[in-house]
Image (cartoon, rainbow, N blue to C red):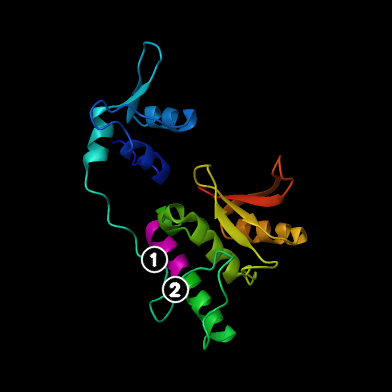
Amino acid sequence: MTRQPTAAQRRVIESADPVTGRLRGTEAQLAALVKRGLAFRHPRPPHDHFLTPAGHRIREAEPEPPAPEPRSADGVFAARVGGEEAPEAGISGAARLREVHSAWQGLLELRRMTNPGGATDRPCGWERAHLVRAAALALEAAGHPPAGPRGAGYRVRATPQPEAVAVYDEDTAALAGLAATLERAGWQAGEYTEPRTRVRYVLASPRRA
């Protein structure tokens, strides 16, 4: 039985040429699709990749219903990714802490229900489909302050890499703590430096095993 593609691989499949099934993606993505039997590499130059019948079936199938999102006790929650305006008036710090705690517990329960073997020590499918929000929730739940419109604090941003987010903080001394928190939450994380700007950041991706 063909294994289901990851969210990143599904995006490659869904963007295939509707007539020929010709694929565009990174070499790693295309090779992974070939390995799963969802694509093949044409033997003649330029050796383009195309969907197999199994790949076409996945593209044409009805999308799976989304997994329920982690929510707070009142049913409404949005993880702070950093850079947002100040919280609305009337929302106390204690109330936000309760919301974050409730949402994190809900996420752990979602891991238990959807991960193989009920594992809660690594991210689940919802987190892989919502990388920025999932990483931000892990950081806020551990007590790290998100950045406001200006000033220090974490900022979680998407990256061109599949299944990876970048975490910035003007206080670069805080990066080690951010990386450690994500590691404890089931992510792989390490500190890097952008080659052109020399800005330090944490690159993190959900751990699979």
Residue 170 placement (x, y as % from top left): 72, 61
- Horizontal side of residue 128 vs 38, given as left or right: right
Magenta segment, which residues? 106-114
Q: Residues within 10 Å of mark 1 (few under 14, many from 20)?
A: some
Indicate yes or no whether the magenta region holds residue 112. yes
Q: For this rendering, which residue is in front, 36 or 173?
A: 173
Residue at image point 69% right, 60% down: 169
Residue 25 placement (x, y as % from top left): 43, 32
Q: For this rendering, which residue is in front, 144 or 86?
A: 86
Q: Quadrant of residue 69?
A: bottom left
Q: Quadrant of residue 58?
A: top left
Quarter of the image where the N terminus is located: top left
The image shows residue 87, relative to residue 78, as above or below, that is below
Residue 129 placement (x, y as % from top left): 42, 53
- Horizontal side of residue 136 vs 29, given as left or right: right
The image shows residue 88, relative to residue 113, as above or below, that is below
- Horizontal side of residue 94 vs 34, given as left or right: right
The image shows residue 89, relative to residue 30, as above or below, that is below
Quote the CA–CA distance across marks 2 and 1: 9 Å
Q: Which residue is mark 1?
A: 69
Task: Identify the mark at residue 88; answer none if there is no mark.
Answer: none
Asked if the residue at tag 1 contacts the one at tag 2, i.e. Cβ–Cβ closer than 8 Å, the answer is yes
Indicate yes or no whether the magenta region holds residue 127. no
Task: Identify the mark at residue 77; answer none if there is no mark.
Answer: 2
Q: For this rendering, which residue is in front, 180 or 204?
A: 204
The mark that comes first in sequence, 2 or 1, is: 1
Mark 1: which secondary structure? loop
Q: Residues within 10 Å of mark 2 (few under 14, many from 20)?
A: some
Q: Could you tell me the amino acid type at mark 1? A: Glu
Mark 2: which secondary structure? loop
Residue that protrudes farthest toward the right in the picture: 173
Q: Quadrant of residue 144?
A: bottom right
